[in-house]
Image: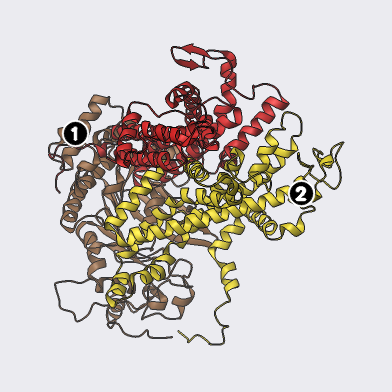
Chain colours: A red, B brown, C yellow
Amino acid sequence: MQSILVMVVVALVAFTMFRYVGDPVNQMVGVETSMQEREALRQRLGLNDPDHVQFLRFIGKAARGDFGISYQQKRPVSELLIERMPATLELSLVSALFALLAGVPLGVYTGLNRDGFLSRVFLTVSLIGISLPTFLIGILMIFLFSVQLGWLPSFGRGPTVNLGWWQTGFLTVDGLKALIMPSVTLGLFQLTLIMRLVRSEMLEVLRTDYIKFARARGLSNVAINFGHALKNTLVPVITITGLQLGSIIAFAIITETVFQWPGMGLLFLQSIQNVDIPIMAAYLMMIAFLFVVINLVVDLLYYVVDPRLRVESPAAGGHG
Amino acid sequence: MAEPLLQVRDLVVEFPTRRGTLTAVDRVSFDIAEGEVLGVVGESGAGKSMTGAAVIGLLEPPGRIAGGEILLEGERIDNLPYEKLRRIRGKRIGAIFQDPLTSLNPLYSVGRQLVETIQTHTDLSPTRARARAVELLAEVGIPAPERRVDQYPHHFSGGMRQRVVIALALCANPRLIIADEPTTALDVSIQAQIIALLKRLCREHGTAVMLVTHDMGVIAETADRVAVMYAGRIAEIGPVREVIKSAKHPYTHGLMGSIPTIVHDAERLAQIPGSMPRLTDIPPGCAFNPRCLHAFDRCRRDRPELIPIENGNVSCWLYDAAASLGVAETRALVARQAVASEPADV
Amino acid sequence: MAERADDRPAAPGMLRRWLDSDLWFSFTRSPVTVIAGVVTLVYLVLFLFGPWIAPHDPFDMASLNIMESFTPPAWEADGLPQYLLGTDDQGRDLLSAIIYGARISLLIGVASVLLSLVIGVLLGLLAGFLGGMVDAFIMRVAEVQLSFPAILIALLVNGVLRGVLQVERQADLAYAVLILSIGVSGWVQYARTVRGSTMVERRKEYVQAAHVIGIHPIKIMLTHILPNVTGPVLVIATIHLAVAIISEATLSFLGVGVPATEPSLGTLIRIGNDFLFSGEWWIAIFPGIALAVLVLAVNLLGDWLRDALNPKLR
């Protein structure tokens, strides 16, 4: 229910932008076109129809993936999006994996060894990680690894291989090299977030009564920390991480700008700079859709992990 | 006389804080015999839970044992390294805590938690362990245990959960159980059932119990002996009936007097004027002296030791042999406390 | 007990109480937090007295000498002593530019936080106090907005406003646009917290009593409930300040923030980015360090505040 509401609201916002910001006709035609021709064009495009009609038409077209023509680039928006999608998705995926695979163990370690020296080091580094804006990290990395050391390429994706309509950078060494810095940059923020979250959840859980009782029963540290504490820690971590996935895709905008990575984020930014409404609207709808999907997946995961959420038959429960 | 199961000698538990070191348990000594139920009673903050936590080795840092000894079956356990202590926990000393709603991990089935504990302390195979788990559930009175063993904690009511907790604590047949307010969080009607269950099982298995609670009713019902704690120290310790019927220490007497009873009419409940001192503000000498009607000079100077009287001990200078009027007279003197009157001396 | 002699001095002054308090204690306990506090103080001083402290005025076009652009920092071979950190592509002294830029970054950051705070607290109070439809509506909006990362919303608002406003006025209104974008994207945290506290307090008896007596609901909200939420709100605000500063820097870096004529730290980094490869590294790196240090200090303070005010961790 929630999701439908989100989509509707977003669609409304997108449509409002379309309708009221800038004038599509003026954007599309040259300066010499007469008023009459503009008027005729307006009529043909259905821009004089009542609002709700236009809105429905808008939704219909969106559902079919038709977002109109980019003002700036004169090409269908959907084409542009599909072209740039693989780049962004690959980048986001690698970043997310990086953040998770490094963040969770680090979080567990700093949670278990609360006051240890190494923990403090990690925490300090994590604090720096949150404090550095993504673009700054990117710039610093470029400065270090490209300018000074010359190890890694500083922009672009490198050579890509076409698998059907999908262009992948995974299959070439240079492609992979180009992927390293951007994904680390993008993932660093998420990593620190995940690490701190896992740590704080872990600390909370370690203070609960059932952990205390587990200790009183003489269970081993391994059983307590990894069997009991970890599982309970991960439950809330799942939601937050899921939501973070969405923000990775959004933050890709910044990373793609710094590294000139030809993805959807860069496209969106350019559309903001040029007030290219169709792209803005399309990006918005797409992100909303993505979030809805992610939310659903997270809800499902929650259901699988936490038995309290599974609705049982009424025969359960007893008295005394 | 057989050697006591548990011996606590001059136990001191401290908490370093920025305002100085707090002494939560101040030289407490007592014994628990095999199969005996010792009640430990007192107000909140008197140090009862800390004592229990210290015995099982679960003091939360920065709290620590700063002095004294704890001996289990004659061997010291307070100075053992973590691993050795862990092996004792569950196997030789068990614990039950107050809130059944938070004592069980909500993500694992009851059976899994039981089997895990069983397998930690015995060599049973998974199948045998599971069978044992079902047996235990039946023992604590859970109906249809074969079905319920796979259910999750949230499928059980509070009282049922506490039964599961008891089952878990008794899994490996420990010699001693520390029960910290086991019925406080339960409905009154359930309390009696759980207490009866605990009493029965411990009698059947010969398990000793250190029953920590602020509820005298539970103590009266269940304990063999009782220790009354005040401000981190033991005021009086002795057989239950003696302590309740003929309390020796002025504090105990006040405590008994303040319990409402159907037996005789009273215009008002007796109240001990003042309140238990905060751990940072314990007066010199006897901790109770500011509120005690019978306090004299020595009470304000020297802290009383546990003086053996009849079947128990009292820490009160009134009973000191050198100043004695005889036990019976002293007790009568203490019993003559008027209701809510002014302290004798300023 | 003897009566207390009344020759004790009157209640110890506010300063004494503050110095004795747990808050100050936990502050001085941690050297890191003290350093963070000092750093923030330094930035604050720069904010207030910047124009008098900075050696040059980087915004005064007339004083710029284009011949001296791209001067490296003073300690390098070609450096000049009057330009301690070097100059940028327009001949602006980098140290002064950083000071002025930090002022702008702080200004926008604080203003955005204030905007978010006001919107959030107000909406939170309304939602918590009035309940029902109002609450449901506000919370729905909050949830929808929460599904999107703040930066995206900020970008969007920015884009829309640019589309709506005339091009000429864009430079003037850049600050307002920025503050609006960041402010609008950040209110939800405040609203949620305040709503929660409001709902808790509303049920308490003293509020109901006040209601019965006939005190106006707004007065109840302001005088009773508001003081109870200051703690958590303060923590959120501090952490949000760090986020807001980063957001502004990011937007400026992306080119949709503070224009290059009077650059903020983010804009400076953007300018410097173009010259990283050609060797004039200082134009990007020094503002970067200044930004990082500021945000780090604010974050540390926020962390300390949160731990200090959290009753569970004591």
Left or right: residue C189 compared with residue A6:
right
Q: Quadrant of residue C224?
A: bottom left
Dot 2: few (<14), some (14–19), or many (≥20) neighbours within 10 Å? few
Return the x and y of residue A71 as percentages of the image width and height.
49, 31
Circle 2 residue: C61
Q: Quadrant of residue A82?
A: top left
Residue closest to the eye, B335 or C88: C88
Q: Secondary structure at mark 1?
A: helix
Indicate which disc residue B134 carries: 1
Compute the Cα span from label 1 to label 2. 86 Å
Residues B305 and C262: in front is C262
* Badge nearest the viewer, 1 or 2: 2
- Tell me the chain of label 2: C
Q: Chain of mark 1?
A: B
Q: Position of residue A290 (x, y in %)?
A: 38, 32
Q: Residue at x 51, y 35 (%)?
A: A251
Residue at x 33%, y 26% (from the top left corner):
A64
* Of residues C90 and C283, the one drawn nearer to the viewer in this rendering: C90
User: Where is residue B156 drawn, in percent x and y?
Assistant: 20, 43
